[in-house]
Amino acid sequence: MHSANFYPAGSSRCLLVSLDFTKDHLVISNEDNEVLHTILKSELIVASKLASTNREVSIPDVGQLVIPTSNEIDELIYPSNKLQWAAKLESSYKAIVISLLLVPLSLLLVFKYGIPYTAQQFASIIPDSAVELASIHTLRVMDSSLLNPSRLRKTDQEAFRSQWKVQLKQVRLDTNAYSLQFRYSETLGANAFAFPNGTIVVTDQFMDLIEENQSLLHAVLLHEIGHVEQHHSIRLISQTLFSSLVIDYFFADVSGLIDIFSGVSTTLVQNQFSSQLEWEADNFALQTMKGANMSTEVFALALEKLAQTLPEQSKMDKWLQTHPLLRERIANARK
Amino acid sequence: MDKHIDYSQYSYEDLLSAKAGLDQETYPERAAELDKLISEKRQIAIESTSSPLVNSSQLRESDIIFHGKTAEFFGIWIVNILLTIVTLGIYSAWATVRTNRYFYSNTEIDGHRFSYLANPIQILKGRIIAVILFAVYSIASAFSPTLLLIFIVAFIFLTPIMIISAVRFKMRMTSYRNVKFGFKGQYGDAFATFILLPIVSVFTLYLALPWVLKKIDEFLHNNMTYGQQNFSTELKSSEYYIASIGALILGVVVAGLSLFALGASVSTLSADAAQASTFSMTTIGIMFGYLVVFLIATSFYHAHVRNHLFNSTQIEGVARFTSTVATTKLIGLRLSNFVALIVTLGFALPWIHIRTSQFYADVTQVTILEGIDKVVDGAQDDTSALGEEVANVFDVDIALG
C-alpha cells in the first residue's frame, strides 16, 4: 500500500488514493477502499527518476499520480534501473567529482583549442566569391562613411603601387592577389587595414606619419598581407561566433547577472584572440622579409612611428586591448 | 449491479467524479457514456461567456514552500554540464528539462507541486532553430551590411512571434494539479506592445517608457490562462513610474558615490607609481562598479514592480497573489550572489539558484479561492484538433539557453 495524490484527467480535482501493485497491474483505490481504476503497468508513463522529487506517473485519459518517493516505490515504478542512469549519475559522488574535474578542463580545451581550430577550418571552407562579395560591400560602406578620396596625387599613388609590385616579386608573392588603395580619413587617422580579398587600404595620414618612406610602407603592407594570407578576418568572425555560441549555450540561461558576464567574457576571449592574430601577422611579415634577405629593422621603425601616435599606449589595459603592447612587438621585430 | 445510471442530470463536476470513481474495465459502456457527456459539458463550459467561477469566495491562505536542496541540485547541475559538453551541446535539452523539473517539482502551493511537462526533443528543435538563426545572422552581418539590414527588418517582425511562442511554450509546459497553464496572446497585440510602443517611447525621450513596461506586463499577464480560467491584472502606471524613477535615482547616486571613491583611490595610487597594473585594476574596478550599480538599480525596480504585479493579479475564481519583496533584501541577495559567483569561479551557481528560488517562495503568498478544484483543463483557444496540431508545430522553446 502506497498513498499518492491522484488528479483525474480533465480538471483540477485531487483525490487521496492508495496504490497496490500486482504483477501486471496498478490498482488505484480511494479512501474508502473502493477500487477506482485497475491499469496495466505497461500503460503507465513514468517521468524519469529525478533526485528526491515526488514521482510523477501519468495515465493517458485517466489522470496523473504524484507519489512521495521511497525506495520501495522506486523499485515498483522503475523496473529497469539502467534506464535511470541520469539520476544515478547525478547522485553518485564519483560522477560528481569526475565532473568537477572534467568540466573546467574541457571548457579550457574548448576555448583554447576547439574553437580556434573550428574557426580555422570554417575559414578555409568559405568560398572565395563570398569573401570577394563581403570585402567589396564593406569597403563600399566604409567609403560612404569613414573614408574620403585620397588627397595624394594620382601619379604618386601609381608610383607607390608599382614599387610595391616590385617588392612583392622580390618576396615571391603573387602580384595580382593584392591591390593597394589610398584614402583620406580624419576619423581613422594613421591606419592601414586589409580586406579578406587582398585589398589593402592605407590612409593619407599614415603616409604622412611614415614620411612616405617606402620601406616602412612595405613592412606594414606585409603585415597586412599576413592577415589576408592567414584568413584572419574570417577566423575572427567565426571565432567570435563560436565562442559567443558556446558562452550563451552554457551560461546564458542562468540569470540576468550572467548576461553581463557573458558580454564581458566574450570581449575578453575575442581580444585575446585578436591579439594572437596581430602576432601571427607580425611574424608573417618578419619571416617573409628575412626570407628575402631584407632587414627587419624597418618593421620595428614602422611600429615605433605608430607608437608615437598613441601617447596613451602605456596607460591602456593590456587585457582589454586588441593590439599587443607595441613595445613587445618592436622587441620581437628586432630579435 | 448492471442497472442503468442516468447521468444526464449530472453536473460537469459530478461527471468527472463519476468517471474517476468508475472501474472502466468492468463498465466500458458507462465509461463511454460518461466520456461523451463530459465532452459535451466541457463544450458548454467553453462556450458560456461568463465563467461560473468568477464569484468564488476565499478559501484559505497558502505559503509557497520550496523543497530544493543545494547539495542535491549541485550533483544534477555539474553532471548535466559535463554531459552537455561531451555531447557537443545536444544533451543541454535534456539538462534543461531535468533542471526545470527539479525546480517545478520542488515548489509546493497548498499541498500540491508543479509539474514541468516539456519533452527534450521539443527543446532541442528550438535550440537548433535558434543556433541556425544566430549563425546566419552573425555571418550575414559580417559579410554584407545590406543583408544585415534585411535581417534586422525581418527580426523586428519575427520578435513578437518568438516572444509569443516562448511564453506560450513555457506556460503550456507547466501544470498544477494536472491542469495546464496557457497563453492566448496574439501577434497583432504583441507587435504593438513589443515593437510599436517602445519605438514611440523613443520619441517621448523615454518619458513614456515606464508606461510601455506596464503595457508589456499587462499584455503578458492578461493573456495567461490556468485551464479555462483567465488571469486578470490591472496595473497602475504610477507604480511603474515610481519604480523606474526610483531605480534611476538610486543608480545615479550609487554610481556618483563609487566614482568619487574610485577617483580618490586612483589619485593616491598614481601618486605612488604610475604603473600599468594600476590602470588595469582601475578598468576592472569600473566594470565591477558598473555591475554593482546595475544590480542595485534593477533590484529596486524589480522588487517594486513584482510586488505591484503580484498584488494586482488573480486567476479568476482560483487564486490571488501577494508579494512582499523588500528592496534591501533583494539587493543583499543579488550582491551576495554576485560575490559568491566570482569568488567560486561560477561553482556557486547551484546554490545561487536554490537560494534565489527560496527567497521568492518566502516572499510570496497565495490566496486560494473556492474554484480551485473546479478548474477545467484545456485552454479556450485550442479546443479544435486542428488548433492543437498547429499549436504543436510551434511548441518549441525558441531561446538560447
Image (cartoon, coloured by chain):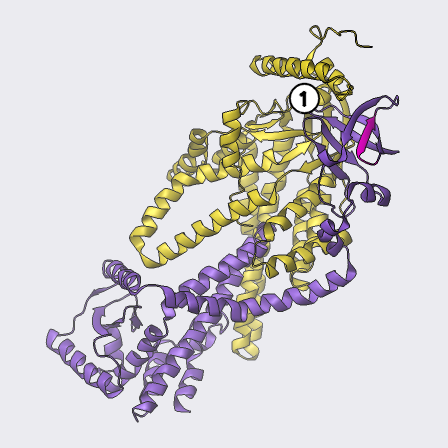
Chain colours: A purple, B yellow
Check if residue A267 falls in the magenta segment.
no
Provide the residue designation for mark 1.
B375
The residue under the point 22% across, 74% down is A180
Q: Pick the residue in front: B119 or A209.
A: B119
The residue under the point 63% across, 40% down is B303
Q: Please provide percent x and percent y for residue B29.
A: 71, 15
The residue under the point 68% across, 26% down is A61
Q: Quadrant of the N terminus of chain A?
A: top right
Q: Pick the residue in front: B347 or A217.
A: B347
Q: Pick the residue in front: B205 or B178.
A: B178
The residue under the point 21% across, 82% down is A212
In the rendered view, would you say A34 is above or below B351?
Answer: above
In the rendered view, would you say B375 is above or below B70?
Answer: above
Main SS class of the magenta portion in the image: strand
Q: Pick the residue in front: B36 or A13.
A: B36
Does residue A161 appear in this view? yes
Q: Amino acid at mark 1?
A: Val
Q: Please provide percent x and percent y for residue A255.
A: 60, 50
Q: Is residue A175 left or right of residue B395?
A: left
List the single residue furthest toward the left: A155
Does residue B213 appear in this view? no
Secondary structure type for disc 1: loop
Range drawn in magenta: A23-29
Q: Residues within 10 Å of mark 1 (few under 14, many from 20)?
A: many
Q: Identify the subunit bearing mark 1.
A: B
In the rendered view, would you say B102 is above or below A194?
Answer: above
Q: Please provide percent x and percent y for residue B172.
A: 59, 33
Q: Is residue B321 left or right of residue A168?
A: right
Check if residue A26 falls in the magenta segment.
yes
